[in-house]
Amino acid sequence: MNLFGTEFTTETSEQRADSGGEAPPESIPIQTIRGGDASDVVSEGLLRTTVAEHGDPAKNVPETVRRVRGEFASLQRVLETRIARYDAALEVVFEDTELIIYRLETERDFENILDFCEIETALHRRVIVALMRAIATDRTDTSPEYPLVVRKPTAFRAGERHARARLTRPDRTN
């Protein structure tokens, strides 16, 4: 998915050979390539505590933690691809080298994002919202009621590092 919400398509050699097919080639989503898991902004302790607080009906906290971590990672990958949209439309309340926290206006904004990312389990939705609130509270002095925590994409962080290095480098053209 690109910045504008459309999917990139990639042709395979089989698809190129079959030029007379009736159906268009199937799109292959391109995922953000990152070091580590996109959910690594959430500590294991915070995740376990939050799952326990929101009452896992199956009483299988380790499995629920694993599933919520996967949902959170998937959500972060989608949010990373849409970061330019959030920069243009939402207020930034906190930013560091790892993540950006935006202010959402209503709870419905959260619901729309979770719907878009196809997170359907009510428990997972509650835990993810609670995790975002906990991260925002931990990182900022004035946490918004509806914080959207987005991990910065690798390219974004690399660009920041490059710009900082250029700004702090002494001028060697004397």
Image (spheres, rainbow, N blue to C red):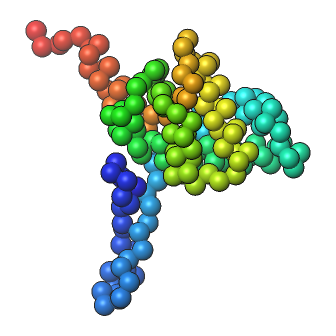
Q: Is residue 174 above or below residue 58?
A: above
| In-front residue for pair 174/29 | 29
- Residue located at (44% from left, 61% from top): 29
In the picture, measured across the screen, residue 40 lies left or right of residue 59, that is left
- Give x and y (percent) for residue 101: 49, 27
Which residue is farthest left?
174
Where residue 59 sits in the image (x, y, percent)?
89, 45
51 relative to 12 in the view: left or right: right
Query: In the image, what residue occupies the spot 54% across and 28% down?
Result: 147
Asked whether 100 or 36 is in front, the reply is 100
Nearer to us in this view, 90 or 76: 90
Relative to 61, is 127 on the left or the right? left
Occupied quadrant, residue 131 = top right
Up the image or down, 104 lies above or below 16; here it is above
Residue 161 seen in the figure: yes
Q: Position of residue 171 (x, y in %)?
A: 18, 12
Where does the C terminus fall, quadrant-wise? top left
Residue at the image position 72 percent from the left and 29 percent from the top:
46
Q: Position of residue 49 (x, y in %)?
A: 79, 30
Q: Residue at x 55, y 29 (%)?
A: 146
Quadrant (top left, top right, bottom left, bottom right) of the N terminus:
bottom left
